Image: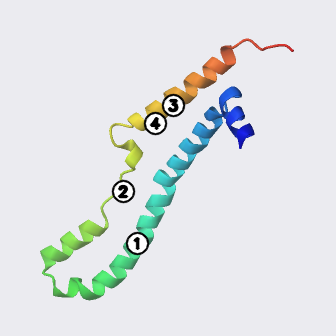
Amino acid sequence: MKKFFIWLQQDEGWKAIMAIIYALICITDFILIPAALNVMRKEVLDEGLKTAMAGLDPVGQVEFIKAIYRQYVPLTLQGNGLFHISFGAILTGSAISKSSKPEETK
């Protein structure tokens, strides 16, 4: 564990960890959550059409279907994508600073 913390501080391993975390957040927000919502919508529709729709008037049925099929908006895109701009600035800045450092010779 001590070697990990040394790598994290001295070898700038925090940049690699940040890139991995950013990739995991994007995969979750753009792929996993929408897929899970689609699976859950199908289950709700199967059960909801049989029970809830039977007792509703036509306007209520339309509202029920609209509530189920509203479009998913990724959480990281709310706020005009400031989350992605921030991560991009940090990762780009660290990559540029790493490439502009002179190489040490031993």
The disc label shown at residue 88, or none: 3
| Proximity of marks 4 and 1: CB atoms separated by less than 8 Å | no
Quarter of the image holding residue 6? top right
Upstream in sequence: badge 1 or badge 2: 1
Q: Amino acid at mark 3?
A: Gly
| Proximity of marks 2 and 4: CB atoms separated by less than 8 Å | no
Q: Amino acid at mark 1?
A: Met
Upstream in sequence: badge 2 or badge 3: 2
Nearer the observer, disc 2 or disc 4? 4
Q: Which residue is mark 1?
A: 40
- Could you tell me which quadrant the N terminus lies in? top right
Upstream in sequence: badge 4 or badge 1: 1
The disc label shown at residue 72, or none: 2
Q: CA distance from mark 4 to mark 3?
A: 6 Å
Question: Is 40 placed above or below 9 here?
Answer: below
Upstream in sequence: badge 3 or badge 1: 1
Q: Which residue is mark 4?
A: 84
- Residue 40 % position (x, y): 40, 72
Quarter of the image holding residue 79? top left
